[in-house]
C-alpha cells in the first residue's frame, strides 16, 4: 500500500512512506524496479554535527539498481526512502574480487608431488589456490648482473594468483611446489 508516491527528488520527505511488498522467497522487493532488496544490518550509534544519530542503528533495505535504501519509520511497517550513500553501495565486480581474495590457500607443506598436465591453452589448475596457472618453457641460461640466472632453465608451472611455482621432479611427469 502506497501512502504517497516516493519521488526521486523528495528523499527523506516525511510524506514519502511506503509499505514494502514481499516476493515468493519472502524478501522485500523494490517498488521502483521489482528487484529483491539487500538487507544491511544497522551499526553503532553515531554522532553527527554534535547530535546523536540513532537512524544508523536501524537495518537498511538497499536497492543497488535504483541507488536508494529504505528504513522503517518508528516500527510502523512503513518505510522511508533515501539516496544510497557511497559506503553502502556494493559493486558486483568488487564483491567477486573479494571472494577470490578470501579463498583459502593450501599450506605448502600439505602439497604432495603430483602429475600436472597443461591443457590446449598451455595452462592447468593450481593445486594450491584453484586458479589457472601458466606453463613456462625452459630457456637458456641468462646473465643477470654478471651472474648466471638458472631460474627458468627447466620447464615449470607458475601461478600468477598465489605466486606458487611447481617444478618437475627429475625426469618424471611429477611436479612439486618450489620456493622459487
Image (cartoon, helix red, strand yellow):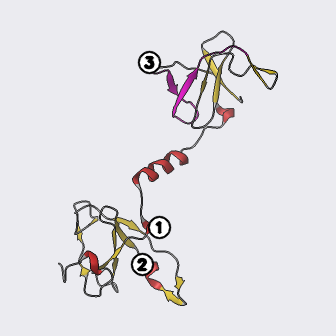
Please give the residue where the numbered disc 2 appears in the rendered image: 58
Give whichever of 137, 117 is nearer the camera. 137
- Dot 1 or dot 2: first in sequence order is 2
Q: Secondary structure at mark 1?
A: helix
Q: Residue furthest front?
A: 146
Quarter containing the C terminus: top right
Q: What mark, if any, has residue 102 been given in the picture?
A: none
Looking at the image, which residue is at 25% across and 87% down?
15
Query: For residue 128: magenta?
Result: yes
Position of residue 165 relative to residue 20, above or below, is: above
Q: Secondary structure at mark 2?
A: loop
**Residue 37 horizontal/vertical position (percent):** 31, 65
- Dot 3 or dot 2: first in sequence order is 2
Left or right: where does residue 58 sit relative to residue 16? right
Q: Residue furthest bottom?
A: 51
Question: Which quarter of the picture shows residue 58?
Answer: bottom left
Please give the residue where the numbered disc 3 appears in the rendered image: 120
Q: Which residues are magenta?
A: 120-141
**Residue 36 horizontal/vertical position (percent):** 28, 62
- Dot 3 or dot 1: first in sequence order is 1
Look at the image and tell me whether residue 112 can be seen. Answer: no
Other-residue count near label 2 (Cα within 10 Å), few / some / many at <14 / 14–19 / ≥20:
some
Looking at the image, which residue is at 45% across and 48% down?
96
**Residue 145 horizontal/vertical position (percent):** 80, 26
Looking at the image, which residue is at 23% across and 63% down?
33
Q: What mark, if any, has residue 87 been given in the picture?
A: 1
Give the alpha-carbon distance from disc 3 to disc 1, as whole Å: 43 Å
Looking at the image, which residue is at 52% across and 34% down?
130
Position of residue 157 relative to residue 33, above or below, is: above
Look at the image and tell me whether residue 10 can be seen. Answer: yes
Amino acid at each position: 500500500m502506497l501512502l504517497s508516491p516516493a519521488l526521486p527528488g523528495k528523499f527523506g520527505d516525511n510524506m514519502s512512506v511506503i509499505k514494502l511488498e514481499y516476493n515468493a522467497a519472502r524478501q522485500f522487493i523494490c517498488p521502483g524496479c521489482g528487484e529483491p532488496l539487500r538487507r544491511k544490518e544497522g551499526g553503532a550509534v553515531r554522532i553527527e554535527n554534535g547530535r546523536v544519530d540513532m537512524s544508523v542503528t536501524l537495518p537498511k533495505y538497499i536497492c543497488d539498481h535504483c541507488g536508494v535504501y529504505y528504513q522503517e519509520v518508528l516500527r510502523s511497517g512503513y518505510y522511508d526512502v533515501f539516496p544510497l550513500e557511497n559506503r553502502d553501495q556494493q559493486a558486483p565486480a568488487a564483491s567477486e574480487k573479494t571472494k577470490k581474495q578470501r579463498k583459502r590457500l593450501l599450506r605448502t607443506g600439505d602439497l604432495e608431488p603430483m602429475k600436472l598436465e597443461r591443457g590446449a591453452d598451455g595452462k592447468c589448475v593450481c593445486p594450491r589456490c584453484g586458479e589457472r596457472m601458466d606453463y613456462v618453457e625452459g630457456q637458456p641460461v641468462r646473465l643477470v648482473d654478471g651472474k648466471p640466472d638458472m631460474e627458468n632453465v627447466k620447464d615449470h608451472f607458475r601461478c600468477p594468483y598465489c605466486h606458487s611455482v611447481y617444478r618437475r621432479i627429475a625426469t618424471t611427469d611429477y611436479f612439486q611446489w618450489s620456493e622459487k
